[in-house]
Image (spheres, helix red, strand yellow):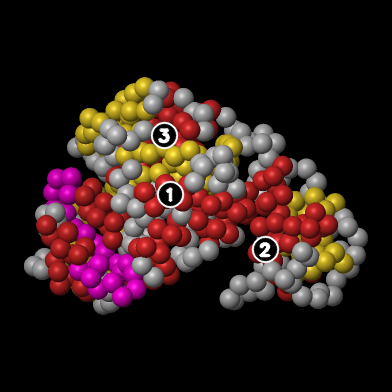
């Protein structure tokens, strides 16, 4: 965090009431176990917890103040607020206002975490860069990330996710990006947004919070791009594309090697640069172009781009290749799933030699179109030449029906794992994928080669 804070500073931002001394604060934390001397504890409430109950524990750890939503029996100075999350966002706004770093906000239905990692890697070549850690991209994670800003940071790459309207607006209002990037709008989390139109509207919330004289980096290939361009108003718009030369940033001469990694020429307004990615799949070419565009708009050079992109490693659970038992190969894409990301992963699987097996869990939050989308993935896999499809979960039964011969549904994870272990051989390549709730990482764990093997 940048400088000292006081309870009254935060009170002005979120209309709270200071009770007791207006103490100086070094740092704010929402974790009572993580308190340091001079910290203030922000009590958040969730479905299964109430941070107000942990104020005494925070005090024992060294907290000098607490931000609470109800009366607490404590000697600590307090800030009483209506909503702890709004108080957290208020502290984030104060921190962001004190920072001279360029703030880059990234959202989209697909690819935003990979683009965040790529952008962070590029900008780290140019200066001190704060990057959203892991998957800390929700309405709690974004303010917490902003609280990590220091005087030394020249850039901050902030990922923003959402599964309903208003969440990106909340996060982006704290970050107030100088530059914002929307990767795309796809039918993921459609249940929370109602429709693809709702998703387009929600992703566009980041535009409204971006500096009026800031920049937007948008996907030229997305059918909804002009909707976002109109929403941009006075902001400068730059477009990126997979291979369309009419965009400001685009790829050409794309080739996918035998190991599934891509090489291409990156074309930009200031020149071209050959790039060799260490990530799998043609879809990561588009992610790389998007990252290059937003990083260069923030001031990165072509050499920063090349060095940054070529040093990026796969994010755990996001289409990374692992050695499996009995010398099989395993593509780990267990972090999450949507119809478009399933297709991208299948496109990678079909590049490998040998017997290709898709091991699929349910896709969640697809609303009334769930059956249709699962069926389309089964058809897509069959048409791609995948030899077998093994599935678990009620919704994935529709994949099995659509795939036809060679598909099998399992009623238990144990049976699924046993079957996969039985057919594993040097000639077999597995792709493991499903939404978070499907817990496909448990399957991945049993197929991955043990270190001692």
Secondary element at tag 2: helix
Residue 282, percent from left and from top: 26, 42
Secondary element at tag 1: helix
Residue contact at pointers 3 and 2, CB within 8 angstroms:
no
Q: CA distance from mark 1 to mark 3?
A: 23 Å
Q: Earlier in the sequence, mark 1 or mark 3?
A: 1
Residue 436, percent from left and from top: 40, 64
Disc 1: CA contacts within 10 A as few (<14), some (14-19) or many (>=20): few
Disc 2: CA contacts within 10 A as few (<14), some (14-19) or many (>=20): many
The stretch of residues the image draws in magenta is 350-375
68 to the left or right of 137: right
Mark nearest the camera among 1 and 3 is 1
Q: Which residue is mark 2?
A: 86
- In the foreground, 266 or 176: 176
Q: Which residue is mark 1?
A: 230
The reply to whether residue 3 is visible in this rendering is yes
Relative to 352, say whether 252 is above or below: above
């Amino acid at each position: 965090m940048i400088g000292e804070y006081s309870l009254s500073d935060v009170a002005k931002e979120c209309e709270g009431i200071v009770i007791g001394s207006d103490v100086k604060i070094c740092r704010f934390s929402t974790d009572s176990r993580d308190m340091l001397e001079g910290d203030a504890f922000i009590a958040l409430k969730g479905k299964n917890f109430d941070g107000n109950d942990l104020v005494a524990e925070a005090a024992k750890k060294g907290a000098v103040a607490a931000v609470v939503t109800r009366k607490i029996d404590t000697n600590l100075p307090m800030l009483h607020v209506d909503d702890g999350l709004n108080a957290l966002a208020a502290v984030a706004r104060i921190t962001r206002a004190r920072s001279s770093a360029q703030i880059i906000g990234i959202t989209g239905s697909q690819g935003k975490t990979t683009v965040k990692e790529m952008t962070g890697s590029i900008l780290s070549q140019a200066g001190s860069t704060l990057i959203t850690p892991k998957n800390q991209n929700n309405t709690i994670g974004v303010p917490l990330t902003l609280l990590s800003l220091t005087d030394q940071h020249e850039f901050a790459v902030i990922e923003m996710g959402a599964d309903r309207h208003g969440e990106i607006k909340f996060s982006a209002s704290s970050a107030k990006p100088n530059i914002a990037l929307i990767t795309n709008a796809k039918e993921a989390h459609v249940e929370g947004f109602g429709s693809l139109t709702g998703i387009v509207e929600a992703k566009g919330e980041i535009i409204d919070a971006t500096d009026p004289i800031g920049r937007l980096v948008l996907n030229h290939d997305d059918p909804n791009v002009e909707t976002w361009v109109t929403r941009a108003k006075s902001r400068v718009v730059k477009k990126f594309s997979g291979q369309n030369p009419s965009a400001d940033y685009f790829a050409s001469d794309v080739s996918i090697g035998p190991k599934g990694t891509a090489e291409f020429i990156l074309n930009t307004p200031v020149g071209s640069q050959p790039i060799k990615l260490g990530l799998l799949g043609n879809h990561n070419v588009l992610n790389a172009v998007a990252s290059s565009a937003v990083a260069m708009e923030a001031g990165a050079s072509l050499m920063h781009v090349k060095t940054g992109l070529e040093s990026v490693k796969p994010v755990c659970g996001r289409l990374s290749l692992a050695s499996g038992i009995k010398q099989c190969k395993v593509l780990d894409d267990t972090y999450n799933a949507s119809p478009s990301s399933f297709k991208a992963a299948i496109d990678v699987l079909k590049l490998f030699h040998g017997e290709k097996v898709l091991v699929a869990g349910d896709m969640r939050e697809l609303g009334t179109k769930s059956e249709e989308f699962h069926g389309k993935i089964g058809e897509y896999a069959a048409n791609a030449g995948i030899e077998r499809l093994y599935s678990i979960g009620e919704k994935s039964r529709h994949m099995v029906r659509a795939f036809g011969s060679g598909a099998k549904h399992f009623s238990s994870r144990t049976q699924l794992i046993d079957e996969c272990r039985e057919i594993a051989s040097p000639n077999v390549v597995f792709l493991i994928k499903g939404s978070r709730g499907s817990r496909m990482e448990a399957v991945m764990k049993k197929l991955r080669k043990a270190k001692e093997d």
